[in-house]
Image: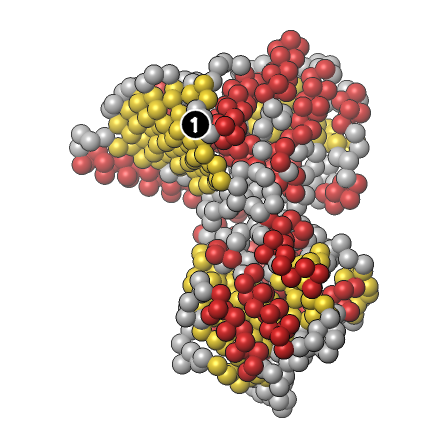
Amino acid sequence: MDADRSQGKVRIGIVGLGRVATATHIPVLKQLEEVEITACAETNKDRVARVKEILSLPHVFQDYHEMYRSKIVDAVYVCVPPHIHYDATISALENGIHVLCEKPMGRNLREAIEMTSLAKEKNLILMPGFKYRYSETIRRGAEMIQSGLLGKILQIDGAFMTPGPYISWDPKSEWYLEEEQGGVLYDIGVHIIELINSLVPTPITRIFANASFGYHEYNIPTNISCSFNMGKEIVGTLAFGWRLSTDLINISVHGTAGTVTIGLKSFDYYNAGTDPKDRVFGHLKNAFYELRTVVNRVYKIFRGTEVSINDLEQARAFVRAVRKEVPPSVTGEEGVYVHNLLEAIRRSIQTGNHVEIQAA
Amino acid sequence: MNHPDESHMRAKIAIKKISDIDDYDHIRGGIESLLNYLKDDFQPFNGGTVLIKVNLCLLLGPETGATVDPRVARAIIEWLKANSPVRKIIIAEADATHLSADMAFKALGWRKYFKEFDSDVEFCNLSQDKRVEAKTCCGRNIEMSARYMEADTLISLAKLKTHSLQKITCTMKNLFGALPEKYKIKYHPNLTDSICEFASVRPPDLSIIDGLIGMDGKGPVNGFPKICQLLIAGTDMVATDYFCAKVMGFRPKSVPHIYRAIEFKLGKSLYDVIGDLLNGENLKFKLMPTWEEYVRKSIKRVRDRKNKGSMGDAGNEIWEV
């Protein structure tokens, strides 16, 4: 298969036609001129019947292995539930197909390592679906931290709170409450860990976690708080939860020269010595940024092209990496790092002790 | 203009203010008062089956205002057991688009909470039950759960909360949730008529509204809990919803499915209220659509007007309060 298609369109296949594919990835990919969705794979015939016409989908295979063998895709989006991520990804890589794998990248560290090793061995792109890092505020934050404006980073606090996976999400998402899926940890814990890693790429070396199990008769954590160390100098906290009437991401990075607080739609920089007029200027900049976001959104609603910027940027990054124009913006190794940490948090919850983290 | 149902008799609505919603005895006392107020109109079938259709469409507890409080269901069951020789009590819910009823019964602790009632209280997932045909008010045949249709007494236990499309969710919207199909969201483009149709196949013998903690703002999912300390009951589903809309501070006829239900003659809009009168005050529930929804709806309204020369689907306007 011609993986290096720097001229023609990248032929993309979609594995799984659930909510994340039909509501997010397919509409996004259809906006990219350099992409052609050439095939999909879905086992649920009712679902295929429901969405095929609406989304003008091309050939839909019942089995993704068949789609891989058909040689009509250069890259795939793996959008099936997590317990199928490993097989769908490994099989694609073995067939010489690049993969964007929805988070979490496999069920456990072992699977993530195997997927990453195979991608490396085959010289193929494997990108975990860490879409939030493409949001403008996170990118601004990362730039600010990397420029040294915050001085030496000493402390980080990250929180991601949602009502839960069952709201506005895949109608078939009962699997979210299965014990092996890891509850809130493998749902949004993945995101907050990868976001902190994208802002401050220093590995977490020690972690302690507390959890509550808020659903009766389901042994899955619903609310988790952690404290961690990044080497000897940086300490921090992580908090993520379901069952909350909110949808909030909030990360504060505190350095010797200032603090930056980042939400998905907000961005604030504080420094004790900041001149009041600079603060006003900062607020005006934020207001301008918010206004621009609103205007963009209105324009998109008007044009009927409402897609998430994060997903669009993620798709662009993936396609450009497949075309070998740029290196992948997220690597399989980062997926492995996240899994390593998730397993440490799980161990800490089970044992009630701190867990030292060795590089995987 | 005279209302079509003005010549008919008036419905009876009972309302009770609960002074301490943390104390189960107060809730049980409230339910007892409501059912005593309505005892001339509501008597469960002697020796029959009572099915209580609850609203558990999300995995959020009653403290969020999203789902009904199991303590209210318990108070109803205790009243039934003490006052009426019912054979069996069934707590029922169908799969929602985003959630299976079995999972909701378990995860929200309902099964555990009612364990002591043993076989006297059963749980039923209406989506998994045997189906029977039922006729809607529009003459359409649809499939409903056999146990739902065949229960001797049907009680709707709904929530006092806002709905971004319909303004309120109370009895009729709760009965829409009894449809065994999981993908109910497919009815949302024509939600007003769908609510009336599905509610009409089996109007409840008693409608109880759990307004201990209601939901304000962007309901029925993402709103704010609003402590109202109210329990409301009625035997006419339309009158009960009409009254609830008023209590919440909405003009009842601006609630699309109430207006349509009156047109379909599914119930009354005239009623007498007994119990703790609210002295004309309303609880001023607020609808809080996001600016994006406002823009989306405004654009849709303009396009509809341009395309059809009409006001579009005025029934689904959510701005007029």
- Vertical position of residue B201 compared to residue A279: above or below: below
Left or right: residue B83 compared with residue B222: right
Assign a secondary structure to mark 1: strand
Neighbor class of circle 1 (other Cα within 10 Å; few <14, some 14-19, many 20+) is: many
Residue sitting nearer the eye, B8 or A323: B8
| Image mark 1: chain | A
Q: Position of residue A118 (x, y in %)?
A: 65, 13
Q: Position of residue A124 (x, y in %)?
A: 64, 14
Type of amino acid under label 1: Phe
In what quadrant of the picture does the N terminus of chain A appear? top right
- Taking the spot 62% from the left edge, 26% from the top edge, the residue there is A107
* Residue under pointer 1: A208
- Taking the spot 60% from the left edge, 24% from the top edge, the residue there is A108
Residue sitting nearer the eye, A102 or B316: A102
Q: Position of residue B172 (x, y in %)?
A: 62, 68
- Taking the spot 29% from the left edge, 29% from the top edge, the residue there is A259
Q: Position of residue A267 (x, y in %)?
A: 35, 35
Residue sitting nearer the eye, B30 or A175: B30
In the rendered image, the residue lying farthest to the top is A121
- Taking the spot 43% from the left edge, 44% from the top edge, the residue there is A294
User: Residue B51's image quarter?
Assistant: bottom right
In the rendered image, the residue lying farthest to the bottom is B7
Residue sitting nearer the eye, A199 or A77: A199
The reply to whether residue A186 is visible in this rendering is yes
Left or right: residue A239 compared with residue B262: left
